[in-house]
Image (cartoon, rainbow, N blue to C red):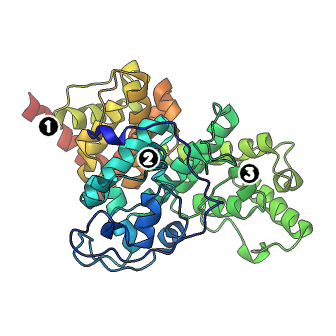
Amino acid sequence: TNDPSLAHSSANVPTVSSMPAVAPGPVAAGDASSSGWARDPLASTLERGLPTTAVVPQLAAGAAGDAPAGGEGHGSSALAMPLQQAIVPTTVQMPLAAAHAGEGLPETFWRASPGARAKQVIDHAVAAGGPKIFAVAPSDLTEPRPRMQQCFVASVVDAFGDGGEDGELDTYEDETNDSAEARVFKNWAASLGLKLNMKDLYADSCSGIVLLKVMDRLEPGAVDWGRVEGTPKNKYETVANCNYAVKVAKELGLKLTGISGQDISEGKEKLMLAVWWQLMRKDFMQFLDDLDMDQAFVLSWANAQVARSGADMQLSRFGDPAIKSGVFLLQLMRAVAPKAIKEDLIRPGHSELDRQLNAKLAISTAHKMGARVFCGWQDILEARPKLMLSMVAAVMSVYLKTNSYTKDDVLREMRQGSVALG
């Protein structure tokens, strides 16, 4: 934002746990005075820079709410009233609250349009949290897009915490390789369309049920759900589920030497990562087989799409260092699904921060498009060839489904495009 009064500072933020939840109330219609606009309990609480928690469950549950009188709400019943006005949950507004602790949020914030308020929230979150923040557009916060909103809220909570006991923002050390791998597997699982809503890969997998759902998705009918205890009541039922998960995994061709159901039920991280890696690898190989196109063809298609979009970028191979900026991937996604990303969100990619933000935006955009996600944003920065092939191939798969195209249709289109470009 250009308003210098909104600059981020290191001021303390009150803890969420120390404050009572405040139920959202209607915002008064019309222009209110400096005291009148704060009559809404939610607005009043946020104005003082204090966290509320009541809106987040409403968001997750898709609570109904009509657009406020005199406001610019969209009239959708899919979102709670405060979110329709871009008065986002305070966990999202922590960067703004930190900048104004003690004096509250500026009145200009509340007088702005929903889109402008959402943009301020996103700008301050990114400025304060950098690449930790899940990339979204302002419209993702003002439109009924709960999946994007929940990811954004979760990333802000992860970046800033709840303020800690002393009211100071938590600091986070660099994430370990294990947590990075776990995040990749969660990204992939989320792209399967199973609505798993996993928060912790290990804790959510130790009952065996999530693993069985994924296996059944990869090979429908592989799991006999009559043998599964949907809500294991004790350790023995949990281990039985996990033993069955190991059995099904081996039937699918996974090599689980030395891995038992007991290991899974106990949440042994390295062994769980090995199971998740093999599941993702099986899906990846099947995905490429179903696509039935070699790497050179996929690369040529991607270059043609980006060229037709007007971007002056081409890749020589999937490990091309140029892909590290994230710009090529984002321009490709924009060419395939223009509504999934706005061009002004794409950064030049000259600095490390730009590259990180572009990489995170590419992952979130792939989810928004409905593409399979086989990699993490760090893999884009490293230009890992096979994973970049997976990303481009996933975007291509969306393109084929959207247009009901076959390989021959793509070949014909590429020939026509070459003539037009030539």
Query: Mark 3: which secondary structure?
Result: helix
Q: Which mark is residue 417?
A: 1
Q: Residue at x 77, y 59 (%)?
A: 245
Tell me which amino acid carries mark 1.
Answer: Gly
Tell me which amino acid carries mark 3.
Answer: Tyr
- In the image, residue 26 sits, relative to residue 48, either above or below, namely below
Query: Mark 1: which secondary structure?
Result: helix
Where residue 34 sits, quadrant-wise, is: bottom left
Q: Is residue 18 left or right of residue 260?
A: left
Q: Which quadrant does the C terminus fall into?
A: top left
Query: Which residue does the numbered mark 3 point to in the structure image?
Result: 202
Query: Which residue does the numbered mark 2 point to in the structure image?
Result: 100
Q: Which quadrant does the N terminus fall into?
A: top left
> Residue extending furthest right?
236
Query: Mark 2: which secondary structure?
Result: loop
The reply to whether the C-beta atoms of the residues labelled 1 and 3 are less than 8 Å apart is no
Sooner in the amino-acid sequence: mark 1 or mark 3:
3
Q: Residue at x 66, y 47 (%)?
A: 164
Q: Nearer the viewer, mark 1 or mark 2?
A: 2
Residue 385 rendering spot, x and y as whole percentages: 48, 27
Q: Nearer the viewer, mark 1 or mark 3?
A: 3
Tell me which amino acid carries mark 2.
Answer: His
Q: Residues within 10 Å of mark 3 (few under 14, many from 20)?
A: some
Residue 219 rendering spot, x and y as whole percentages: 60, 60
Q: Residue at x 59, y 61 (%)?
A: 197
